[in-house]
Amino acid sequence: MVVALLAICDPPGAVPAYLGITASMPPEAKRKAPLRVALTVCLILGVALLAGEILLRMFGISLPAFQAAGGLLILLMGLEMLKGTPTKVQDESKHELDSEDRILVPLAMPLIAGPGAIATVITFSAKSKSWEGNVRIAGAILVTSLVIFLTLKSAAWVQRRISARGQRIFLRFMGLILVAVGAQLLLSGVNSFKG
């Protein structure tokens, strides 16, 4: 269960977006960002465990549609990173309150706690049908959140040791990766919806 969640959340894959989003944040907010992302992911997956299927049904949203929308959001962010310009979530013209919320969307959701992770938690929960099974799933969510925290915390440390030029090259390269991830999610969602 932990391995499945870690594979789908892919904390190392979120590092480029995290570094890009936090680049213009004040030092104090940047220091708190890994914990905020990890707690948000834990909360999102916890809600998915307890009420995910009900919430999607309540709004009339299918899992494939949710996946396609998340993929489109990630794809658009990747395209902006490829251009070497700050994405809308990185825009420094936003007021101070927004600067700390940039990491929540699209980083915590849908990039890390995306449709795949949410669908996985909902599926595990539907299969377990017992409180013991749900406790195991909750444990897997906690372990995943801890790994996310440690990964993002170490990413900031590594970034400080890379030159500005290296960071620009890395940002563009990772923009391409994000475009591919977003396109994959979008196409998977469309294919699932058709099938």
Image (cartoon, helix red, strand yellow):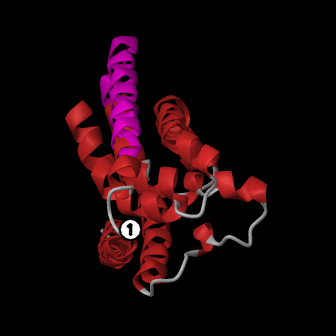
Viewer-closest of 49 and 167: 167
Looking at this rendering, what residue extends furthest in the top direction?
132
- Looking at the rendered image, the quarter that the N terminus falls into is top left
- Residue at left offset 44%, top offset 78%: 81
The span shown in magenta is 127-153
Looking at the picture, how far across and down is residue 56, in whole percent?
Answer: 55, 49
- Residue at left offset 55%, top offset 77%: 86
Looking at the picture, how far across and down is residue 177, in whole percent?
Answer: 29, 72
**Is residue 104 visible in the rendered structure shown here?**
yes
Viewer-closest of 147 and 109: 147
- Residue at left offset 38%, top offset 16%: 135
Looking at the image, is 108 positioned above or below residue 50?
below
Amino acid at dot 1: Phe
Looking at the image, is 46 positioned above or below residue 33?
above
Q: Principal SS element in the magenta part?
A: helix
Viewer-closest of 168 and 129: 168
Q: Which residue is mark 1?
A: 193
Q: Secondary structure at mark 1?
A: helix
Tell me if mark 1 has few (under 14), some (14-19) or many (20+) residues whose alpha carbon lies within 10 angstroms of its own: some
Residue 137 part of the magenta-drawn span: yes
Looking at the picture, how far across and down is residue 121, in whole percent?
Answer: 38, 37
- Looking at the rendered image, the quarter that the C terminus falls into is bottom left
Residue 130 placement, left or right of 24: left
Looking at the image, is 175 positioned above or below residue 55?
below
Looking at the picture, how far across and down is residue 105, in whole percent?
Answer: 57, 57
- Residue at left offset 60%, top offset 67%: 89
